[in-house]
Amino acid sequence: MYQVLMPSAPQRPPWSPSTDHTSTRWAGTGLLERMLDVVDYGMLAVQADGRVLFANKVARTDLDTTHPLVLSGGALMARHACDVLPLREALISALSRGLQRLLSLRDDAGRPFVVAILPLWEAAEANADAGQACAGAMLMLGKRQVCDGFSADAFSRHHKLTTAEARVLKQLCAGLRPAEIARLQGVALCTVRTQIGCMREKTGAASIAALVNDLACLPPMATRLLEAA
């Protein structure tokens, strides 16, 4: 693992509720932390020196043994040497220039991982005019799939889909074509097409793409945590 070293912060992070620099809590009451913990996107607040001030539950789950980024010793680190410079440059762009960046990383198997890096400050324009650097950045981890099983199940129950239809829906969200679904399930292609037609009628979707889009646009509840519970 390779640590990303950043310049020292010029001022206290604007999200810190007190002058206690040893505190790693982002919200004084904990309410904001609890709110972020039930959002199905991994989110981290990173100080200019690379120290992680906050990571929600989904982020701590996502940064597993396969993700190109790692949480280690309270700091954000790159798992592979090739990612150190791109991560450092993206953080510098956010912290020093107030620029939002998308960072594309890949794991050992070549799977893509996209991270959005956003500057955190209370008044970006005022700080920029004063020539002050941003003290921290927010990292938002991209989702690994359009939807998880819990979301598909909730969507299916809401629209009263059958068990077979719900199964086809999950496979459509995984990017499978109707012919592939029929082959995997050992049924005729016309059966799968009938099931898709029933799903479209029940949900009001005009096409398969619209059906998948409706599911992808569900509120980002932290369904993986609910499944684990």
Image (tube, rainbow, N blue to C red):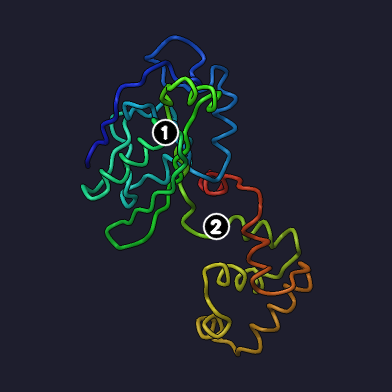
Q: Residue at x 31, y 62 (%)?
A: 110
Residue in front for this viewpoint, 152 or 207: 207
Residue 209 position, x and y percent, is 64, 71
Residue 3 position, x and y percent, is 24, 36
Q: Residues within 10 Å of mark 2 (few under 14, many from 20)?
A: some
Disc 1 residue type (three-letter) = Arg
**Tag on residue 97?**
1
Q: Quadrant of residue 72?
A: top left
**Measured along the vertical axis of the image, is residue 85 above or below residue 30?**
below
Q: Residue at x 39, y 37 (%)?
A: 93
Task: Find the distance from the CA under tag 1 to the CA under tag 2.
Answer: 36 Å
**Measured along the vertical axis of the image, is residue 53 above or below residue 181?**
above
For this view, does 30 lie left or right of residue 59? right
For this view, does 59 lie left or right of residue 77? right
Disc 2 residue type (three-letter) = Asp
**Measured along the vertical axis of the image, is residue 167 above or below residue 224?**
below
Q: Which callout, 1 or 2, points at the residue further toward the start of the chain?
A: 1
In the structure shown, which secondary structural element does the residue marked by tag 2 occupy?
Answer: loop
Residue 47 position, x and y percent, is 38, 26
For this view, does 160 lie left or right of residue 11? right
Residue 188 position, x and y percent, is 60, 90
**Tag on residue 148?**
2
**Tag on residue 109?**
none
Q: Quadrant of residue 30?
A: top right
Residue 144 shows up from this direction: yes
Q: Tell me the quadrant of the picture where the N terminus can be found.
A: top left
Q: Residue at x 27, y 58 (%)?
A: 108
Residue 55 shows up from this direction: no
Question: Which residue of the protein is positioned furthest toward the top in this rendering?
Answer: 19
In the structure shown, which secondary structural element does the residue marked by tag 1 occupy?
Answer: helix
